[in-house]
Each structure stands twice: as C-alpha cells, then as structure tokens.
Image (tube, rainbow, N blue to C red):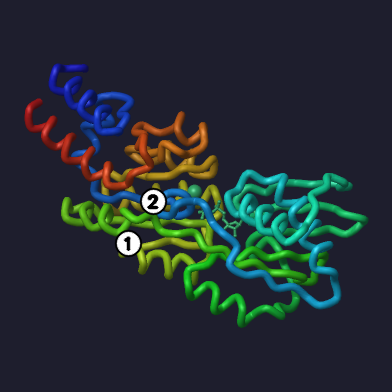
C-alpha cells in the first residue's frame, strides 16, 4: 500500500533521477544482497570505438570493409555501429545487395553476398579452422578490447578490436555498494579475457563471461539461490529477461525501450552511483514504515 512514507521516498527518488515504479520495489532495494551488472552500456559507456583492424592479404581492404559495413548496418548492436563508422571513414561504401541477411542477437550477423556466406560477430559464431590473427587477438583482449571476427565459410578473413570505456563513476559506485554489504557481479556475452580486464578495472567482486542471451537469466537465478535478494542492472534488449527474473530490475535511462519497460527502477541519468542512493533511501523509508 502507498503510505505517506512510501510516497515521500518515491518522490525523493524521482527528484534525484531515480524512477521507482512502485513501493514494493523500493522496499526490496533495502534488503539486496547482490547486484548483477551487464557490461556493455551499463558498466561501460556503450560507445565502443574500433582500435584495430587486420585482414588477410588476398582481398582488397576497402572492398572487404564495404561488405562488412553493409552487413553490420543491419544490426542495432553498439559494436556494429562502431564498425560501420570506422569502415565509412576508411572509404567503404554501404550497399544493400544481399541474397540473405540475418541478425543473431548476442552472436552477430550473417549474410550471403555473391553466393558466399559471411559471418561477423563473436568467436563461437564465426567458426574457423585456423586463426592467423592470434597475436593481435591476445594483445587486444588483455587490454580489455572486444574482438569481432569476420569469416567466409570456414576461413577467418578479418578481425576487429574495439574498446569501450568504463564509465567514470563505475569503480566508486561499486565500492559504495560493497560498503553497504552488497556483492557486485558482472554478466557479459563478451569473452573471458576481455571480461577479466574490465572486471579488474571496475573492481567488481565476480564475473561471468561468454554468456548467451538466455544464460543471463540462468545466472540471475543462481545468484538468487546463493545470495537471496538480487538486482540486475542492464540497458539492452538482451537484458530484459534477466531484469524480469531479478528481485529488482534496474534499467539505464539511456537503454532500449524493452529494458526501460521491463525494469522496476530506471536510472534517469545513466548514473550508477544512484543505485546506492536508492538503497539508502529505501533503508530510511523502511525504518519509518
Ligand atoms: P554484452 O553482454 O557485452 O552487452 P552481447 O550479449 O550484446 O554483449 O553480445 C555478446 C557478443 O556477441 C559481443 O561481445 C560480440 O562479440 C558479439 N556480437 C553481438 N552482436 C554483434 C554484432 N552485430 N557485430 C559484432 N559482434 C556482435
Ligand atoms: Mg548492454
């Protein structure tokens, strides 16, 4: 029920950019034991930039970049936008002449161009026999870059590294949550090595990497069993099921519509420090109630 104390807490939250969609969510914030965070767009800015590109010698660089840009233009993923941007600056032209094109959320995009199947996305999605870019890959991942692979049939033809900056407030926001007795966890579809680098930079307590979109839900369930009340923070379409599974779903205000709709709490200014503010607000309210 909406008591004056609940109403006042919700209104105080709104004033500081925390939109809470009901008293029950505010009550639960006080008793959270762990918070799971999506990586891209949540712990990081979600605006990756291409930091490197390598390809096999047999192809023309601009021609290949044109094919890749045309494929990635079909995706709404932030990595895809960064690749299209990079390719265009390198002189690539974007066309739409595909025999077929499919977006595989959480994996990448596949397309048939002039009778050949191209795949652009994560390693598991672009299955290949041989990786000629192994040194490039290792160095880039160590520095927290995300790798995007490009393959035709069973041959790896090109590789991108992309860097997405950790938000300036991430580390402090996570530290404050620890002080409130809340465990912090990262869940990402990105690789183990990249996740490890971003986790170290954020000083997050634990992380789960290489997660498929529906595995985010499984991990939230596991965390609920292990810790009790658990929140999930995310921004993407992929995160919506995990937001719904958590005891409290928290969306970044700049996130996609589906995430905003599914969430119980919205951080209007994308500011992660607001989570500990919301918890403190909730604890104060519960004391009054
Ligand atoms: P995150 O958990 O970091 O938000 P996602 O689940 O959205 O990641 O995607 C997981 C991985 O799938 C990305 O790190 C990337 O390697 C790959 N991927 C997904 N979509 C694309 C795309 N359109 N282009 C390139 N890579 C993609
Ligand atoms: Mg995301």
Would you say 15 lies left or right of 160 here?
Answer: left
Residue labelled with disc 1: 204
Mark sitting on residue 104: none
Residue 96 is situated, as x and y percent measured from the top left of the image, at: 83, 45
User: How much space separates mark 2 and mark 1, taking CA atoms?
Assistant: 10 Å
**Residue occupying image coordinates x 52% and y 72%:** 141
Quarter-of-image position of residue 76: top right
Residue 85 lies, with reference to residue 22, above or below; the image says: below
Residue 52 lies, with reference to residue 288, above or below; the image says: below
Q: Seen from this angle, which residue lies furthest right?
A: 115
* First in sequence: mark 2 vs mark 1: 2
Residue labelled with disc 2: 37
Is disc 1 placed on a helix, strand or loop?
loop
Check if mark 2's residue and mark 1's residue have beta carbons within 8 Å: yes
Residue 84 is situated, as x and y percent measured from the top left of the image, at: 69, 53
Count of number-bearing discs: 2
Residue 189 is situated, as x and y percent measured from the top left of the image, at: 53, 57
**Residue occupying image coordinates x 53% and y 48%:** 214
């Amino acid at each position: 029920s909406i008591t004056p104390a609940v109403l006042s807490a919700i209104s105080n939250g709104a004033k500081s950019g925390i939109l809470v969609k009901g008293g029950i969510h505010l009550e639960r914030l006080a008793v959270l034991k762990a918070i799971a965070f999506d990586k891209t767009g949540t712990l990081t800015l979600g605006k990756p930039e291409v930091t490197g590109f390598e390809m096999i010698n047999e192809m023309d660089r601009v021609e290949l970049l044109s094919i890749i840009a045309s494929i990635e233009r079909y995706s709404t993923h932030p990595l895809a936008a960064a690749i299209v941007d990079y390719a265009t600056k390198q002189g690539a032209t974007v066309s739409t002449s595909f025999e077929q094109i499919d977006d595989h959320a959480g994996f990448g995009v596949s397309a048939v161009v002039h009778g050949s199947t191209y795949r652009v996305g994560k390693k598991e999605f672009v299955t290949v026999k041989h990786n000629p870019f192994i040194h490039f890959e290792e160095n880039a991942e160590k520095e927290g870059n995300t790798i995007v692979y490009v393959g035709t049939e069973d041959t790896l033809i090109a590789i991108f590294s992309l860097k997405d900056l950790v938000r300036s407030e991430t580390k402090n926001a996570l530290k404050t949550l620890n002080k409130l007795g809340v465990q912090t966890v990262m869940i990402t579809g990105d690789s183990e090595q990249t996740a490890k680098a971003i986790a170290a930079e954020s000083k997050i307590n634990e992380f789960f990497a290489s997660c498929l979109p529906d595995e985010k839900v499984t991990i939230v369930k596991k965390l609920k069993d292990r810790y009790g009340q658990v929140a999930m923070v995310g921004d993407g379409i992929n995160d919506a099921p995990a937001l719904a599974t958590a005891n409290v779903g928290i969306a970044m205000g700049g996130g996609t519509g589906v995430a905003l709709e599914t969430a119980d709490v919205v951080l209007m200014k994308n500011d992660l420090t607001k989570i500990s503010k919301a918890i403190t607000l909730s604890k104060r309210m519960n004391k009054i109630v």
